[in-house]
Image (cartoon, helix red, strand yellow):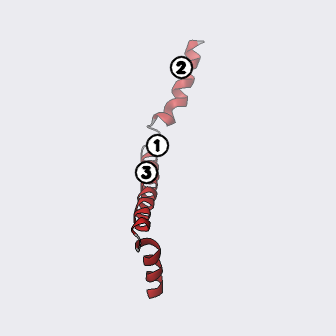
Amino acid sequence: MSRIHDAIYNTFFKRNSAFVATCFAGAFAFQITFDLGTTAFWDYHNRGKQWKDLRAKYVQAGDSEEE
């Protein structure tokens, strides 16, 4: 187990530049994952109530009235 810890330390934490790059990459990956997760939850929870779900109904009704 010590070899794994040494490899992780030497790869990601030993030099400041590698540590900062790891922090930025981790924050970027977390941001994307969190954004996709919350968007999926919001879309699932509000299914049928959002404009993207209702748009076809109203646009289609509006087109037939104009003709």
Q: To which quarter of the image does residue 23 belong?
A: bottom left
Tell me, for residue 47, which label it has, or none: 1
Q: The residue tagged with tag 2: helix, strand or loop?
A: helix
Q: The residue tagged with tag 3: helix, strand or loop?
A: helix
Residue found at the far bottom of this picture: 2
Q: Quadrant of the C terminus?
A: top right
- State the residue at coordinates (43%, 65%): 22
Q: Give the amino acid type for the residue marked by disc 3 in the picture.
A: Asp
Q: CA distance from mark 3 to mark 2?
A: 34 Å
Mark 3 or mark 1, whichever is nearer to me: 3
Asked whether residue 1 is in view, the answer is no
Q: The residue tagged with tag 1: helix, strand or loop?
A: loop
Q: CA distance from mark 2 to mark 1?
A: 22 Å
- State the residue at coordinates (54%, 22%): 61
Q: Is residue 14 above or below residue 59?
A: below
Q: Give the amino acid type for the residue marked by disc 1 in the picture.
A: Arg
Is 14 left, or right, of 65 in this rendering? left
Residue placed most toward the observer, 46 or 10: 10
- State the residue at coordinates (53%, 28%): 57
Tell me, for residue 35, which label it has, or none: 3
Q: Is residue 21 above or below residue 31?
A: below
Number of marks: 3
